[in-house]
Image (tube, helix red, strand yellow):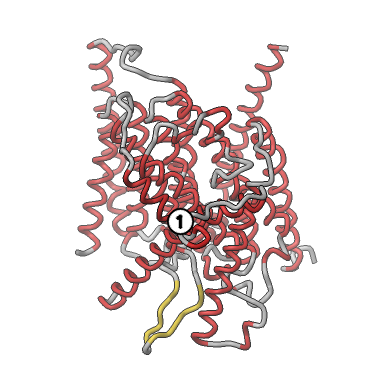
Amino acid sequence: METSEIIEKLLFIGLLFLITLGIAAYATYLERKVAAWFQDRIGPDRAGPFGILQPLADGGKLFFKEDFIPAAADKWLFILGPGIAMFTSMMTGAVIPWSSDIEIAGNTIELQVADVNIGILFIMGFLSIGVYGIMIGGWASNNKFSLFSAIRASSQMISYELAMGICVITIVMLTGSLSLNKIVESQHGMNWNVFYQPVAFIIFFICALAETNRAPFDLPECESELIGGYHTEYGAMKMGFYLFSEYVSMFISSAIISILFFGGFNFPWMDHFNGNTLAILGVIAMFTKTFIFMFVFMWIRWTLPRFRFDQLMHLGWKSLIPMALINMLITGIVIAFNEGWFN
Amino acid sequence: MNLETFAIIMGGLTIGSALMVIISKNPVKSVLFLVLTFFFISGNYILMNAQFIAAVNIIVYAGAIMVLFLFVLMLLNLSKENEPKNSVFVKFAALVAGGILFTVLIAALKDGLVIAAATVDQSDTIGLVENLGQLLFTKYVLPFEISSVLFIAAMVGAVLLGKREKQLID
């Protein structure tokens, strides 16, 4: 790798980092506005016009609060918890292809940090270790409510990861590749996977809600039973990191849903464009889809009540996993039929 | 920095964190160091061009099995007061048994290391999913299928044990 290439990648990583953080910050604002809209209120409107500076005010407040560590807590693990939560949700963005290549002054720039040929497994890997942030934080707080929350989070994550993984396998079977780039390329134009795999999409979406700890699956931070869940003992920016990482993973999972099922940066009539125009329109298409899914995440949160824990386990193990398995079996049979195995 | 220095640093980190698993007093910290060890092992796999195995190692071991370990340990509530006390005799026996196991491992791996070094230098497509899948479903199809039968047997056994307990309660 040449030096210029490394600098180019570093710049892109920095830009992606800033964009992800910015979107996560404004997702908190958007969530409060959406909640207000659903509940017929006005929402935050004091900081700046339409309350647009509210995330900055919140961030500033969190930074200047007292950074407190309980005496009975395990100090290093207590600090490590929010860091891991943030790290794992940010890392997943590294393999997401945001658009086709862009050309600036004769240099071709890939709008993707790393084109790993096992991209989707990379994402599943970081998703599966994402629970450590909650588990470590909850255990290190030395508080029974936090511990309950950590235990809930881990059993929920493991249960829903299975159905999610099976849906991903179905998509991989359709595409024949684990690379996210190939998965996007195979959905050229309007040839999106959601039309072939509607069941897989619904299951994947439900699992994504559960994996990001969003309502109706936010049992780890169920305030009516567990005070604040795993972040009961946290304050200042440490709690901010936990809250923030939820929005980062919401952004990233919306991006993954649009890549796997809604064609990523593909859009209808894309063959009329080429070069940089195509790339820029691709970025716009990708972000539009992502924002639509983020809105759906919020819509669900402010519409549906929370599950009970046994209902959550029942849904995961007795409905979603069998449905995902049957869907995979049918997909396999259809693929085998198309390849002429039964002739 | 060439690949060999990288491999040495990675190996050292792996062994270091593996040692911390046994040295650390707190079982939860032991498990966390074990997770770290799995990450370093995945790093070693990537150095050997086995990306797929590296990712699967993280998903299965660090992401699922270690979460279950941690889950159980958190429920056990281990503390210094109820830590089991080992006598000198048990410690001595453990030392001897461990030493013998170490010798056997070294004897077994002595020739294996040479073969491993020979495969590392091969083409960089060796660990890709396609090649791995081809090998698994042609050359090694029998051990692959037998191990899957073994997994089903273990699952059925676990379900059966769980069911029997319930009948007794009724």
Task: Say whether residue A327 is left or right of residue B81.
Answer: right
Task: Say whether residue B157 is left or right of residue A137.
Answer: right
Question: x%, y% of residue B54?
Answer: 41, 53
For the residue pair A297 and B44, the one nearer the viewer reads as A297
Image point (47%, 26%), residue name:
B72
Image point (59%, 42%), residue name:
B148
Question: x%, y% of residue A29?
Answer: 51, 55
Which residue of the protein is positioned furthest toward the right in this rendering?
A343
For the residue pair A303 and A46, the one nearer the viewer reads as A46
Question: x%, y% of residue A260?
Answer: 60, 62
Image point (19%, 64%), residue name:
B1
Would you identify the image quadrant in which residue B4 lies? bottom left
Image point (73%, 49%), residue name:
A326
Q: Could you tell me if residue A224 is visible in this image?
A: yes
Q: Could you tell me if residue B52 is visible in this image?
A: no
For the residue pair B138 and A193, the one nearer the viewer reads as A193
Q: Amino acid at mark 1?
A: Ala
The kind of secondary structure element at disc 1 is loop
Which quarter of the rendering shows the N terminus of chain A? Answer: bottom left
For residue B48, above or below residue B96: below
For residue A221, above or below residue A51: above
For residue B49, above or below residue A128: below
How packed is label 1: few (under 14 Cα within 10 Å), some, or many (20 or more)?
A: few
Q: Which residue is mark 1?
A: A47
